[in-house]
Amino acid sequence: MIQSYRYGQRVGLLGLVLVIASVAPPYSKWAVADAYGGEDGLNPLMIVQDIRHLGEETVIKSLRKDKKLWTNFVSLVSSGEQAWIDVGLLLLPHTTGAARSDLRIAFEDALIAAPVTTIRSIGPQSRILRLICGSSAHPQYDLAENSINERLSAVASVLVQENPSVTDASLRARLNRCADMLQVADKRLRGPIHDTPK
């Protein structure tokens, strides 16, 4: 009896939390934008939970409902931090229109900020690699050209350096493939070069 009392004292708070959790509804059906308050208010784990329970399209709509929240989300993906790249990769295939362009540009920036982390997160056979390492989603020529050049430079610098984080042959192959795609995108953007007659 004394033993169980001591055990009960030690886990009393934990037990209370577990009882409350078992009585509370398993998941709130609040929209993402309503559930995340505060200045930056976004948490990648909460968004993943929302994706599992509500679906990707609902989460995207909810994030876009509040322009400041969407802008903050896109900025976090573009930071190149692993958790935000993972969340962005879950949502990217389900985006359309302006949301797709915004998220593609965020991944272009993530590739510049953290090429190894970004490419490592993408599966070898993923079509997303073409979106991130291909033509730019920027509508203006100069921004598109700059994005391609910066992404190519970031990927090439990782491949040229003796980088201890690039020991995986599959990762190195994806980085090389990305660099090749960016070179093709650059040529396509610039168009055919014609020699002028002398």
Image (cartoon, helix red, strand yellow):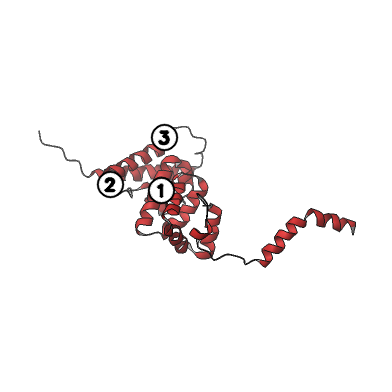
Q: Nearer the viewer, residue 99 or 90?
A: 99
| Label 2 with label 1: CB-CB less than 8 Å | no
Tag 3, which secondary structure?
helix
Tag 2, which secondary structure?
loop
Q: Nearer the viewer, residue 51 or 165?
A: 51
State how far apart marks 3 and 2 are (Cα): 26 Å
Q: Position of residue 76 (x, y in %)?
A: 47, 47
Q: Give whichever of discs 3 and 2 has the lower sequence position.
A: 2
Which mark is in front, 1 or 3?
1
Q: Residue furthest right?
A: 1
Which mark is in front, 3 or 2?
2
| The label number, if any, that marks residue 140 in the structure image | 2
Q: Amino acid at mark 2?
A: Gln
Q: Residue furthest left?
A: 198
At x 55% / y 59%, what residue is drawn? 49
In the rendered view of the protein, which quadrant contains the C terminus?
Answer: top left
Q: Give whichever of discs 1 and 3 has the lower sequence position.
A: 1
| The label number, if any, that marks residue 161 in the structure image | none
Residue where numbered disc 1 is placed: 106
Label 2 crowd bin: few (<14), some (14–19), many (20+), radius 10 Å: few
Q: Position of residue 79 (x, y in %)?
A: 46, 44
| The label number, if any, that marks residue 157 in the structure image | 3
The reply to whether residue 71 is visible in this rendering is yes
Tag 1, which secondary structure?
helix
Q: Amino acid at mark 3?
A: Ser
Q: Amino acid at mark 1?
A: Ala
